[in-house]
Amino acid sequence: MKHKIFYNKKLGLIIIISLLMVSIWISSLMIPIYGGSDSYTIEVKARRFAYEPDRIIVNQGDRITFKVTTLDITHGFYIDGYDVDLLVEPGKESVVTIVADKPGKFKIRCSVTCGYMHPFMVGELVVVENGINIVFVLSILIALLTALVSMYYVWKRW
Ligand code: CUA
């Protein structure tokens, strides 16, 4: 009788811990497998013969709105591989929104002839590939480990 109570307590504890771990695991499913997907605006200034900033680094999955203005004459804002080609006229703001779903380096070019250095008016969009979310992986591992340990104890007790 005494032994039975002890056994039930231990089993109860195991069940509680298992339920806790399962709930942690389920809540971890709400976390995206891949990290960050932010929304933000980047202001780009075009001038003869450069962009400011000339190197834009974002994370894969980010939703980016480019607001492009020119400090002098009309320029273009073309992003290789992202189907973006803006005409940037003086006194106006050219806006485009993209989702950076493709990782890699993409050339930004001026698509309007603007002078002798026009072919060299380039920038770069760097889309950093997102790794697998470590919290997600760890919580799955912990949940599996707990399940295995609980099963082992239950099996040993039987
Ligand atoms: Cu600026 Cu061409």
Image: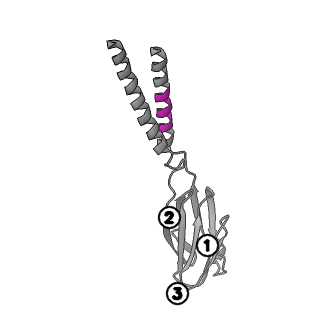
Front label number (1 vs 3): 3
Q: Could you tell which of marks 1 and 3 lies nearer the N-terminus? A: 3
Question: Callout 1, which amino acid?
Answer: Met
Q: Residue 121 carries which label?
A: 1
Distance in Å between CA atoms under marks 1 and 2: 27 Å
Q: How crowded is mark 3: few (under 14 residues within 10 Å), some or many (20 or more)?
A: few
The stretch in magenta equals 138-147
Q: Residue at horizontal 45%, vertical 19%?
A: 153
Q: Is mark 1 within 8 Å of ligand 1?
A: yes
**Where residue 36 sits in the image (x, y, percent)?**
50, 54
Single out the residue that lies furthest toward the left.
Answer: 2
Residue behind mark 3: 91
Residue behind mark 2: 39
The reply to whether the magenta stretch includes residue 140 is yes
Q: Could you tell which of marks 1 and 2 lies nearer the N-terminus? A: 2
The reply to whether the magenta stretch includes residue 126 is no
Q: What element carries label 3?
A: loop
> Residue 54: in sight, yes or no?
no
